[in-house]
Image (spheres, helix red, strand yellow):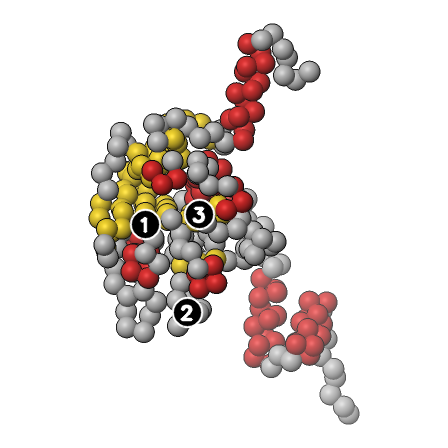
């Protein structure tokens, strides 16, 4: 007499079908069935905590990619944008000025895959558009043939040592940021700013090395472009804090487009004209 076929409930039949479809062995099938049967346990007496209470918050998680330290957080984006919109060299046509934030900067033709990614940098004497017609995907120094005039790095915990020139490159590895800016590209001005301490440090290339530059009333003066770079206490993107921004040589603010609109509206109101009409 043939043996009787075992009887299975709905859960067991589901597990067997699933194991056949997934190619699970008998041991894994048993484990699969045990796990699924556990879902039939009676509900807990207390409701589970919400994901908001149990998962890591932004204060627990790194704001930088551990494989590529220094990737921008929200402050990096806003601060770099303020630098870009206020960088208006007085003696250069806007079509011959280029600035970028978080853009790959390729620097060594013998190692064409090596690059740095400054938080913000500016170049004068190159077309605003690549070859006068296209937006840049990166800045390739051996094609552009003009090095940046200034590089700004915004200090973050993962990059602070390198940004301040306190690390050395390992044999066979890419050089540090400091080495690239100072020795390879020979960038005339290098600035670092910490939002944690509100400290601004400026360096100028003198001969073959960077020297700390004395600030004038808290500003770095760059006469060749008729601008200075300094700290300003004010509201940008509705956030009141100390910001790094461009000014005239005498310290007058270079206004953002939004600030210019606000100034125009204020003048119209002074004349009795409603700017919203």
Residue that carries the numbered disc 1 in the rendered image = 188
Q: Residue at x 35, y 35 (%)?
A: 228
Residue 2 circle label: none
- 26, 250: nearer the viewer: 250
**Residue 23 appears left or right of 267:** right
- 36, 132: nearer the viewer: 132
Residue 154: x, y in percent?
Answer: 36, 45
Q: Quadrant of the N terminus?
A: bottom right
**Residue 181 appears left or right of 98:** left
Dot 1: what SS?
loop
Residue that carries the numbered disc 2 in the rendered image = 109
Q: Is residue 137 above or below residue 55?
A: below
Residue 101: x, y in percent?
Answer: 46, 48
Ranked by sequence position, the earlier of labels 2 and 1 is: 2
**Among the 4 quarters of the image, the one containing residue 225:** top left
**Among the 4 quarters of the image, the one containing residue 219:** top left
Residue that carries the numbered disc 3 in the rendered image = 124
Q: Residue at x 71, y 72 (%)?
A: 13
- 31, 59: nearer the viewer: 59
In space, the residues marked 2 and 1 are separated at their CA atoms by 21 Å
């Amino acid at each position: 007499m043939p043996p009787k076929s075992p009887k299975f409930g709905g859960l067991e039949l589901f597990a067997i079908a699933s194991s056949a479809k997934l190619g699970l062995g008998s041991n894994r099938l048993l484990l699969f069935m045990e796990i699924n049967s556990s879902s039939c346990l009676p509900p807990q007496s207390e409701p589970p905590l919400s994901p908001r209470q149990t998962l890591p918050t932004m204060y627990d998680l790194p704001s930088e990619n551990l494989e590529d330290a220094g990737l921008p957080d929200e402050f990096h984006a806003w601060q770099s944008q303020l630098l870009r919109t206020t960088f208006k060299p007085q003696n250069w046509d806007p079509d011959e000025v280029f600035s970028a934030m978080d853009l790959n900067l390729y620097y060594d033709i013998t190692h064409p895959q090596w690059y740095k990614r400054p938080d913000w940098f500016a170049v004068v004497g190159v077309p605003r558009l690549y070859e006068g017609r296209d937006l840049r995907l990166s800045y390739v120094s051996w094609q552009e043939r003009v090095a940046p005039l200034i590089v700004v790095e915004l200090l973050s915990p993962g990059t602070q040592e390198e940004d301040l020139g306190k690390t050395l490159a390992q044999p066979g590895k890419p050089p540090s940021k400091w080495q690239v800016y100072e020795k390879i590209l020979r960038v005339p001005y290098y600035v670092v700013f910490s939002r944690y301490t509100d400290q601004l440090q400026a360096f100028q290339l003198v001969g073959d090395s960077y020297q700390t530059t004395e600030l004038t009333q808290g500003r770095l003066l760059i006469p060749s472009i008729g601008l200075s770079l300094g700290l300003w206490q004010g509201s940008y993107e509705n956030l009141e804090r100390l910001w790094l921004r461009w000014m005239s040589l005498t310290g007058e603010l270079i206004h953002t487009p939004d600030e210019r609109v606000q100034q125009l509206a204020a003048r119209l109101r002074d004349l009795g004209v409603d700017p919203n009409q």
